[in-house]
Image (cartoon, rainbow, N blue to C red):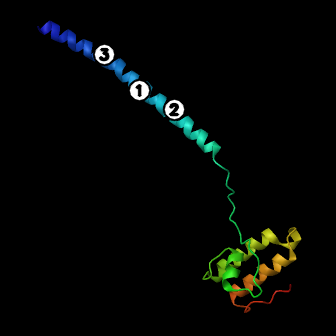
Amino acid sequence: MSASTSSSRGTSQEMVAPLLAGLAIAATAYAGRYSIQAWQAFKARPSVPRMRKFYDGGFQTTMTRREAALILGIRERTPVDKVKEAHRRVMVANHPDAGGSHYLASKINEAKDLMLGKTKGGSSAF
């Protein structure tokens, strides 16, 4: 009996190796299929611009702190250095020397002045 027991053990061990190899191949195939589907979904996604969207509404007759903050793309309680940084960023994008509008530049400057407390609003040249 010991001879038949040892031969059956050898046979079961010999059968396990191909089974494990088959499982490894199947798992690799499923992982590859999932990767291809994920890549195709990634390529098919709509392209979203990476730039922040600036304020695109109409202007009020007298500028408020809320409107000034929207124009500069900041919060109403932003520190002075952040206001100046935001002003510079928006002015670079809209400066009249770079093809921007004089009207927008005056509104951006008015928003900065209002946020820095230099004016009470409504002092646009236009």
The amino acid type, in three-letter code, at marker 1 is Ala
Q: Earlier in the sequence, mark 2 or mark 3?
A: 3
Note whether 117 is above or below 34 in the view shown. below
User: Image quadrant of residue 123?
Assistant: bottom right
Q: CA distance from mark 2 to mark 3?
A: 26 Å
User: Image quadrant of residue 68?
Assistant: bottom right
Q: Earlier in the sequence, mark 3 or mark 1?
A: 3
Q: CA distance from mark 2 to mark 1?
A: 12 Å
Dot 1 surroundings within 10 Å: few (below 14), some, or many (20 or more)? few
Element type where label 2 sits in the image: helix
Residue marked by disc 2? 32
Residue at the far left in the pictured view: 1
Where's residue 66, x and y in %? 66, 82
Residue at the image point whose x is 16% and y is 7% from the top: 4
Q: CA distance from mark 3 to mark 1?
A: 15 Å
Task: Indicate which disc residue 24 carries.
Answer: 1
Residue at the image point whose x is 60% and y is 39% from the top: 40
Are the residues flagged by discs 2 and 1 in contact, CB closer than 8 Å? no
The amino acid type, in three-letter code, at marker 3 is Met
- How many circles with numbers are drawn on the protein? 3
Residue marked by disc 3? 15
Rendered-image quadrant of the N terminus: top left
The amino acid type, in three-letter code, at marker 2 is Gly
Element type where label 3 sits in the image: helix
